Image (tube, grey):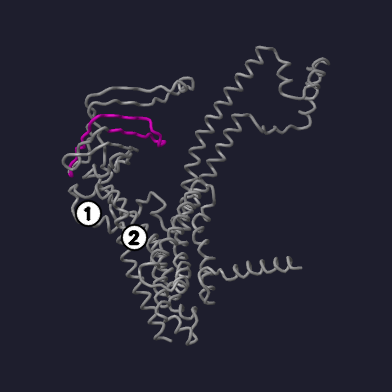
Amino acid sequence: MKILDRYILYRFLYNFFSSFCILIVIFIFQGIWLFIDDLAGKGLGVVIIAKFIFYFIPTLVDKVLPLTVLLSSILTFGTFAENYEFAAMKASGISLQRGMRSLIVFVLFLGVVTFFFANNIIPKSEQKMFNLRRNIAKVKPAAAITEGVFSDFEGTGEGMNIKVDRKYGEQDRFLDNVIIHIKDKQAVNTTVIKAKEGELISSEDSDIIELVLKDGNYYKELKPKRSEEKRKHPFAKAKFETYTINIDISELNNQDLEEEGNITTDKMKNVVRLVKDIDSLEKNNLEKVEAFSKNIITRMGAFPVPTKQDSIQKAQRAKLDKTELTEKKKAQYDSISTVKEFIKTLPEWQQLQIVTSARTSTKSILTTVIGKKEELQKRFKFYNSHILSLHKKYALAFSCIILFFVGAPLGAIIRKGGLGLPMVIAIILFLAYYFIGVFAGNYSKENNIHPILGAWLSTLIMLPMGISLTRRATADRGLIGFGHIMDGIKNLFKKKEKEDTE
């Protein structure tokens, strides 16, 4: 039995590492083709490009590894079934589960290694790749700008997005049709600059990148303090022949590529950091919501808290009310049942004043709520992405185990080896698994479903499939059994014939 276990394990490992190497190369080219033009031919050197690709490879493991496990398991057991090795094992009294025993141990070990990789290696890789791109932008700023789309200009102390139609010249330093959005501290676009031409000037010894713009316009939104002036949406506009923007990147000089503290996104964090940040984000979001709710309630004057009065104050107040109200007013107020009836009792000028004040207050509150809604949505999206990243690390490890139990019995059922049919089936199953995960993740970030479900949905869908395929392979049944369906149809026709004869 040990010889058989070693043989099965050897065949599986051969298919596993072969598939992994082929798939990782395919995914590398598929992943970097979007920005390879910005890296190649910019004087960066082979070493920098190779380092970038080296840091990029670990980020592909969450896609490559599940597909590798699925494909290698289908290839291994499909070859066994096609060469009648699987039939020989069954004839010797070795069941499918017994033949899978050595591979189950390996896949469980692979799941542990995958979690360690997702928790430690991938965040480090994301962090190093992020820092490398920032340092590339320092010496070669044109490499951070993609033609035709808005690009975050790395290395700036303020938020800035740049879009250009074309880059040309030495190291792509010259730009055509430049549009720049500059953000304020609240990450809102307040300044827009448009220019027909631009030029990037930088050097390795300088901490300043000069962006020289020619023949353009400058627009800036003004923020007055008075609410009346805010409604007019004032802005400043200027036309220029030459305009120079100095971008300070001195903060990058002290930045180490190995620095642990440079963590900005959830993908760069391990489990410990994610758990800590999730707790702090949850508390912070709740505090923001509670503070905003109290502010709105105070502005509306709703749900007033009655002041506590002792019995003497209550008696004095009741006595005052009796003396102040005449019999006519008492009868008038006793008959009031709605707000409209109360307003009708007031003079016309006072009615107009109350309605105008209420309308202004309502518009002001609605504007505040709409503005705060966008901010809170961004906060909760950021919070949900942290929960999603945390559970994806666990789901990735379990997906390798579950996809093995999908692929191994599937290979035994289809009885085909090689890279033909097994590759097609593996790609179809993986695409279903991957796209379900992507859609679930996007839905969970928008708070349409819980982030935990978004991380585990694709894995949970594959679980019953793995159980069903394992049962069918153990019982020597085909992939789809039509026998019982045909028998049911035949029995139905027989019953109808008997009824007609009777």
327, 217: nearer the viewer:
217
Residue ID at (49%, 56%): 455
- For the residue carrying disc 2, how many other residues have a C-alpha within 10 Å: few (<14), some (14-19), or many (20+)? some
* Residue 314 percent location from the top left of the image: 77, 29
* Residue 398 percent location from the top left of the image: 47, 65
* Residue 295 percent location from the top left of the image: 57, 33
Q: Main secondary structure of the magenta part?
A: strand
Q: Is residue 215 left or right of residue 469?
A: left
Residue ID at (60%, 67%): 485
Q: Reply above or below: 468 against 125.
A: below
Residue ID at (29%, 25%): 217
* Residue 187 percent location from the top left of the image: 40, 37
How many circles with numbers are drawn on the protein? 2
In terms of sequence position, does the residue under pointer 1 or pointer 2 come before the other? 1
The segment highlighted magenta reads: 178-204
Q: Which residue is mark 1?
A: 48
Residue 5 lies in quadrant: bottom left
Q: Secondary structure at mark 1?
A: helix
